[in-house]
Image (cartoon, helix red, strand yellow):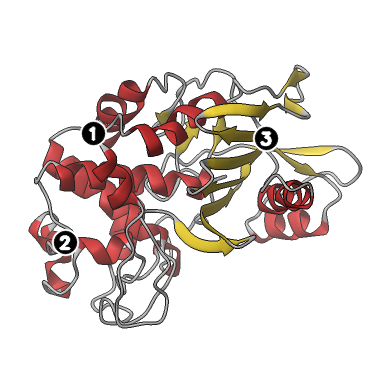
């Protein structure tokens, strides 16, 4: 967990073990899968291209991906960013090989996109409803690749991670790659929810005490797939106020809200605006086979809390808010 104030750590500490096989402790240098916290990074790539005047939020998605032209020009990039596209989630379709859509099983971003686009019609007209869909952010990475003429991971390294000095951050688009200081995912072996979920996808485990090792085998990205450390997230958060990447207009765009034809209007670029302790708060949570993650920023106070867990049942958001409650009670927030 980390507490960041004015671009510096006021607290950063690891608890527990990153690897039970070798008894390796968690530290601020431990690399965690961010799960859905990755969406803000995907959105940041789009933001840079918008500021470069290479794309516009109002551009039809079909301008860059002809395979979505069957849905018409009403589907725009902004609809993907703000989860109001009407696209079906890839998990709504069965896989060709019959395997589950689960990070325990290998599948790629492109397979997920192909499955989602099997539907001849959208679930609803773009902009008329809100629906959380990972496929929106997977397709955004394809648009970035088409416009930049390079793999998404290369773009992210050259335009974001490298410039900010985030040397331990990467897009996990190849599950065979070594990730230094990686936190392996674990869950209690006796947890009935875990046992049931694994049984549903054909995975049997020995009952008893101890832990089940959970590994992310599927290298899909966009809605997830970023691995990073607390130390690197400090640099990412600091940029919100320094404008290192593309000036403060980058922060303004990342914070931007748009009103569509539905009631939900608190989304930003891979982030969500809320109110907490009478202060505006920008946050997001993530969860996957190998992680539970949460990050909340209070821009007026220049204060951010980050909680990363290698337990999918670790409730990072709950732990972060328990900490925020303490800070508020102490008059520190």
Residue 257: x and y in percent read 34, 64
Give the quarter of the figure containing the N terminus: top right
Tell me which numbered mark, 3 or 1, is placed earlier along the sequence.
3
Tell me which numbered mark, 2 or 3, is placed earlier along the sequence.
3
Callout 1: few (<14), some (14-19), or many (20+) C-alpha neighbours within 10 Å? some
The answer to whether residue 172 is above or below residue 279 is above
Q: Nearer the viewer, residue 233 or 136?
A: 233
Which callout, 3 or 1, points to the residue nearer the camera? 3
The answer to whether residue 262 is above or below residue 77 is below
Tell me which numbered mark, 2 or 1, is placed earlier along the sequence.
2
Callout 2: few (<14), some (14-19), or many (20+) C-alpha neighbours within 10 Å? many
Q: Is residue 288 visible?
A: yes
Q: Is residue 195 left or right of residue 226?
A: right
Q: Indicate the secondary structure of the residue bearing disc 2.
A: helix
Q: How many marks?
A: 3
- On the image, numbered disc 2 is attached to which residue? 61
Residue 167: x and y in percent read 42, 18
The answer to whether residue 138 is above or below residue 27 is below
Quadrant of residue 57 within the rendered picture: bottom left
- On the image, numbered disc 1 is attached to which residue? 151
Q: Indicate the secondary structure of the residue bearing disc 1.
A: loop
Q: Are marks 3 and 1 in contact (CB under 8 Å)?
A: no
Label annotation for residue 1: 3
Q: Are marks 2 and 1 in contact (CB under 8 Å)?
A: no
Q: Is residue 250 left or right of residue 194?
A: left
């Amino acid at each position: 967990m980390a507490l960041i104030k004015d671009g510096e750590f006021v607290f950063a500490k690891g608890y527990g073990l990153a690897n039970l096989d070798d008894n390796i402790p968690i530290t601020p240098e431990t690399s965690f899968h961010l799960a859905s916290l990755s969406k803000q990074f995907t959105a940041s790539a789009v933001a840079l291209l918008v500021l470069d005047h290479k794309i516009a939020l109002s551009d039809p998605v079909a301008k860059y991906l002809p395979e979505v032209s069957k849905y018409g020009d009403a589907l725009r990039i902004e609809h993907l960013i703000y989860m109001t596209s009407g696209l079906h989630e890839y998990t709504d379709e069965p896989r060709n090989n019959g395997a589950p859509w689960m990070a325990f099983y290998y599948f790629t971003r492109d397979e997920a996109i192909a499955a989602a686009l099997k539907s001849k019609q959208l679930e609803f007209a773009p902009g008329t409803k809100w629906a959380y869909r990972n496929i929106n952010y997977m397709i955004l990475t394809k648009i970035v690749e088409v416009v930049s003429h390079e793999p998404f991971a290369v773009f992210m390294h050259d335009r974001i991670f490298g410039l900010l000095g985030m040397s331990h951050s990467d897009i996990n688009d190849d599950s065979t790659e070594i990730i230094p200081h990686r936190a392996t995912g674990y869950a209690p072996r006796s947890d009935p929810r875990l046992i049931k979920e694994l049984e549903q996808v054909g995975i049997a485990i020995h009952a008893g005490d101890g832990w089940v090792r959970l590994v992310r085998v599927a290298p899909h990205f966009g809605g997830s797939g970023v691995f990073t450390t607390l130390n690197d997230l400090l640099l990412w958060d600091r940029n919100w106020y320094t404008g290192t990447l593309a000036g403060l207009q980058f922060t303004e765009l990342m914070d931007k809200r748009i009103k569509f034809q539905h009631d939900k209007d608190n989304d930003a670029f891979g982030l969500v605006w809320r109110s907490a302790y009478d202060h505006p708060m920008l946050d997001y949570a993530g969860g996957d086979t190998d992680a539970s993650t949460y990050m909340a920023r209070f821009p007026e106070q220049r204060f951010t809390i980050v909680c990363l867990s290698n337990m999918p049942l670790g409730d990072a958001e709950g732990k972060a808010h328990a900490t925020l409650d303490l800070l508020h009670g102490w008059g520190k927030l």
